[in-house]
Amino acid sequence: MPNDFNQQVIEEFRANGGRVRGPFEGARLLLLTTTGARSGARHTTPVGFLPDVERVLVIASAGGAPKHPAWFHNLVAQPRVTVEDGLFTYDARAVVLQGAERDEAFARAVESDPGWAEYQAKTERVIPVVALEPIPDGPPKPTATSMGAVLQQAHDGIRRELALVRAEIAASGPGLGAQLRVNCLTLCQGLHNHHAGEDAGMFPFLAGRHPELAPVLERLREEHVKIAAALEGLREAVSARGVEPALVLAEVERLADELEGHLRYEEQELIPLLDA
């Protein structure tokens, strides 16, 4: 059973689309559900994560305790886990990173937050890094109860991640850290996937039921093209060797300028129809 603090975080996370207050406010947080190695019971734990483009990384630090956390033992015994990210719930395969791959990922984590190094210094065990890779056996289940709410949650998630990336770049030193580069690339990939899904699924769905939406959908598609160009500019900037954070931040601001008006217009025009 989760402790009282964890249970409070879990309930708040589920009630607010992944947003929580207190020590986790503004952090990247997910709910990880594992199967008990001995009991076979399902256990849910809030854990912080690092973006890694098409997957996420979690670190079994246990605050530098001498033993691995229970959730790590569980996923080693049963690697199929369930992830809740505030927008979707999906099954994933847990892969414990080994050797150089683990060391590189942990170094990225330390570069972005020295607290991970402090945890490692407190314990003799090598703190594991685990990749959670989505299992492609069907679409993830949305947590919202209506199509309009799903769209709103997706937009709010994009806004939160964009705000995090902007703050991280602004607070960075003279160089752009490796994890920060990955955060930017993950944002780009996530936004690309969101728009590709709209172009292939939601827009044709609405066009077939609401022919009067043709001008709205055409405008949204044109804006997708402009945003794609901004995404490519950000990808090129973060991929350049020795790039200055100020140049990357300028590309992020360009993306934000293109994106916010697009999100507001889409919410205004489509959510009432999706919820009707």
Image: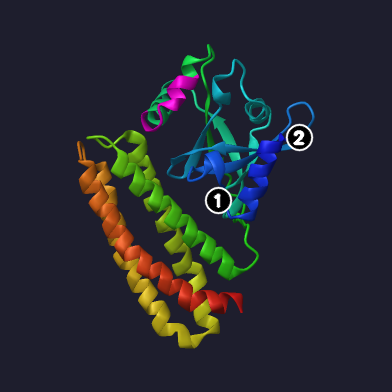
1 or 2: tag closer to the N-terminus: 2
Spatial CA distance of label 1 from label 2 is 22 Å
Percent position of residue 13, x then y: 61, 49
Number of numbered markers: 2
Task: Specify the amino acid type for callout 2.
Answer: Met
Percent position of residue 107, x then y: 39, 26
Task: Specify the amino acid type for callout 1.
Answer: Arg
Query: In the drawing, what numbered circle is on residue 1?
Result: 2
Q: Main secondary structure of the magenta part?
A: helix
Is residue 141 visible in this depiction of the protein?
Answer: yes
Q: Name the residue under label 1.
A: 19
In this rendering, is residue 271 above or below 90? below
The residue sitting at 53% across, 37% down in the picture is 48
Percent position of residue 112, x then y: 38, 33
Q: In this view, does 25 lie to the left or right of 223?
A: right
Queried whether the magenta region covers residue 16, the answer comes back as: no
Q: Nearer the viewer, residue 263 or 190?
A: 263
Is residue 184 visible in this depiction of the protein?
Answer: no
Q: Is residue 202 left or right of residue 241?
A: right
Element carrying mark 2: loop
Q: In this view, does 138 lie to the left or right of 118?
A: right
Element carrying mark 1: loop
Residue lying at the far top in this picture: please name it: 124
Q: Nearer the viewer, residue 80 or 15?
A: 15
The residue sitting at 55% across, 79% down in the picture is 273
* Magenta span: 111-119
